[in-house]
Amino acid sequence: MSLSDPLGDMLTRIRNGHRARKARVSSPASRLRADVLEVLKREGFIRAYRAEQVRPGVNVLDIELKYSEGEPAIKEIMRVSKPGRRVYSKIKELPKFYNGLGISILSTPRGVMSDNEARAANVGGEVLCRVF
């Protein structure tokens, strides 16, 4: 099955997994998805993730969701830059999300990073998603 927005599909799987109170969700693997999951892990929104090989040439990312006192660690996760409308931002024009409590995940020339890391590196890029 062909997906027009693979990253949006992964974010939807995470959102649906939290709503169903699942401990784990899986998503087809790609480098961009793994980089976004690495940022989510560093920022404390998911417990862990790992790549598993289902059969030769087919890899899957197994994502372990995080809960705090029965409540999901991710309250809101939304895609910003979509295939039909790409959203780019200079680092000086990137607003704080939920007054700094949430993060934006950016794809920059230096790799995928959170908005705080991008501000420290003084580099802008494509705003992939926002997480709170």
Image (cartoon, grey):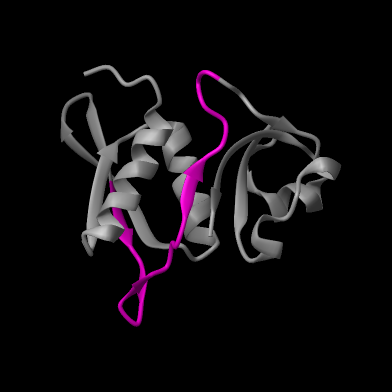
Q: Is residue 50 visible?
A: no
Q: Residue at x 35, y 74 (%)?
A: 71
In the image, is residue 55 above or below residue 105?
above
On the image, the x and y values in percent for residue 53 come to 21, 37
Drawn side of residue 132 relative to residue 67, left or right: right
Q: Is residue 103 visible?
A: yes
The answer to which of 71 and 52 lies nearer the viewer is: 71
Q: Residue at x 33, y 50 (%)?
A: 14
On the image, the x and y values in percent for residue 88 come to 70, 29
Drawn side of residue 72 relative to residue 98, left or right: left
Q: Residue at x 65, y 29 (%)?
A: 87
State the extent of the magenta-drawn residues as a range: 62-84
Furthest residue in direction bottom, as rendered:
69
On the image, the x and y values in percent for residue 109 come to 70, 30
Q: Quadrant of residue 1?
A: top left
Drawn side of residue 90 relative to residue 75, left or right: right
Q: Residue at x 56, y 37 (%)?
A: 80
On the image, the x and y values in percent for residue 108 come to 68, 34
Q: Quadrant of residue 67?
A: bottom left
Count numbered badges in the picture.
0
In the image, is residue 57 above or below residue 20?
above
76 part of magenta stretch = yes
27 part of magenta stretch = no
